[in-house]
């Protein structure tokens, strides 16, 4: 059976305008018709949409038709319907919808990402998706949709600067491990995908951000504490974040957090903490308050560093540890 007839058997009518109209009508019917019947129509239409825009594994989709459908979906406000009705849908149709969402956001029509532009004009959709992490059934679907959005700097910037961003500091500590991990992945993408956007955000929200982040480093939840420490050690030591690191390593409150984490029962946390702690010590322009804090804790720090666990053959870590010990011993 040809691709055209396979498509036609799944979805009638077949012009882009009619395809999108059929999808829109089925979503609108969720609130006006028998729910089970309406859900069946939505599921059939979204399944057919997936075939039309991604193919069936044997035949590639018609790219011109994909672009026409994408444009029509924006013109008919179907993007909003996708988001707003997500909690009402079943597992299979949500999976198909997320697949379609990711494809649609990547389509350029006349040199513009029209779905992204649509979301830019309806930023409340991003707030809705972030809030969906509280819904156990759809949290992972929304996480996938958000990460696709975050690939675009304007959308990432909005989330960072919105009140919704602070919710991630709660989500990464949710008792459901899968959802907490997914939220952490989205959180990381927000802080790593767009260097300029992140630099501007942290420059203007520095105190607020690190106050919230410090709570994660002091969390009673081991997984949260470990993941937060691991990400911080990677994030601060990356070249694009050098200005943030220079600001971070002159504050005693953050040095004290690293000292406490050097005492953690977890080997992995202690090693990650060391990689941040060493920058405080190695900084040639240490302010007096940092020097005094190191002197006040010198005996304990030397003991902690001597007992820092290292893996056999990790010569670089051993050398760094010895160097930091020497620098602390020389402090006056």
Image: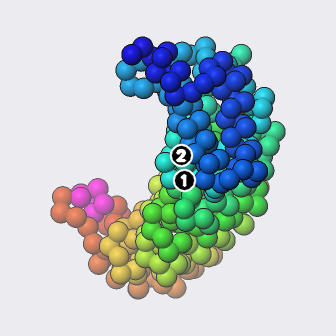
Q: Which residue is mark 2?
A: 93
Q: Dominant secondary structure of the magenta stretch? A: helix
Q: Residue at x 42, y 18 (%)?
A: 59
Secondary structure type for disc 2: helix
Total numbered badges shown on the rendered structure: 2
Would residue 279 be counted in the magenta stretch? no
Number of residues whose C-alpha sits closer than 10 Å to that of mark 1, classed few (under 14), some (14–19) or many (20 or more)? some
Q: Is residue 148 visible?
A: no
Q: Position of residue 188 (x, y in %)?
A: 54, 53
**Which image quadrant for residue 2?**
top left
Q: Position of residue 21 (x, y in %)?
A: 72, 30
Q: Position of residue 170 (x, y in %)?
A: 61, 70
Q: Residue at x 42, y 26 (%)?
A: 56
The magenta stretch is 314-319
Q: Is residue 278 above or below residue 34?
A: below
- Decide if residue 270 is on the left or right side of residue 204: left
**Which image quadrant for residue 27?**
top right
Q: Residue furthest left?
A: 312
Query: Does the CB distance between marks 1 and 2 fall below 8 Å?
Result: yes
Secondary structure type for disc 1: loop
Q: Is residue 75 above or below residue 206?
A: above
Would residue 315 be counted in the magenta stretch? yes
Q: Which residue is mark 1?
A: 90
Q: Residue at x 51, y 65 (%)?
A: 180
């Amino acid at each position: 059976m040809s691709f055209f007839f396979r498509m036609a058997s799944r979805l009638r009518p077949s012009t882009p305008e009619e395809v999108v109209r059929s999808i829109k009508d089925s979503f609108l019917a969720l609130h006006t018709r028998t729910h089970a019947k309406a859900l069946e129509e939505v599921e059939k239409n979204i399944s057919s949409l997936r075939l039309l825009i991604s193919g069936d594994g044997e035949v590639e989709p018609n790219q011109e038709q994909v672009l026409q459908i994408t444009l029509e979906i924006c013109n008919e406000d179907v993007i909003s319907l996708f988001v707003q009705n997500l909690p009402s849908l079943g597992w299979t149709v949500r999976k198909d919808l997320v697949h379609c969402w990711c494809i649609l956001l990547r389509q350029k029509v006349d040199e513009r990402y029209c779905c992204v532009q649509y979301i830019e004009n309806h930023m409340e959709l991003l707030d809705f998706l972030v809030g969906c992490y509280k819904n156990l059934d759809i949290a992972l679907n929304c996480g996938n949709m958000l990460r696709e959005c975050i690939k675009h700097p304007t959308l990432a910037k909005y989330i960072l600067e919105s009140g919704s961003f602070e919710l991630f500091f709660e989500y990464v500590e949710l008792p459901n491990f899968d959802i907490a991990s997914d939220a952490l992945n989205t959180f990381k993408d927000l802080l790593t995908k767009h260097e300029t956007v992140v630099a501007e955000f942290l420059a203007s929200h520095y105190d607020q951000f690190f106050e919230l982040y410090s709570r994660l480093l002091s969390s009673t939840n081991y997984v949260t504490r470990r993941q937060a420490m691991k990400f911080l050690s990677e994030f601060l030591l990356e070249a694009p974040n050098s200005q943030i690191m220079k600001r971070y390593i002159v504050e005693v409150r953050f040095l004290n957090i690293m000292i406490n984490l050097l005492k953690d029962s977890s080997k992995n946390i202690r090693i990650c903490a060391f990689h941040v702690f060493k920058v405080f010590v190695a900084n040639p322009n240490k302010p007096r308050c940092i020097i005094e804090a190191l002197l006040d804790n010198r005996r304990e720090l030397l003991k902690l560093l001597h007992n820092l666990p290292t893996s056999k053959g990790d010569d670089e870590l051993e050398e760094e540890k010895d160097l930091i010990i020497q620098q602390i011993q020389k402090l006056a």
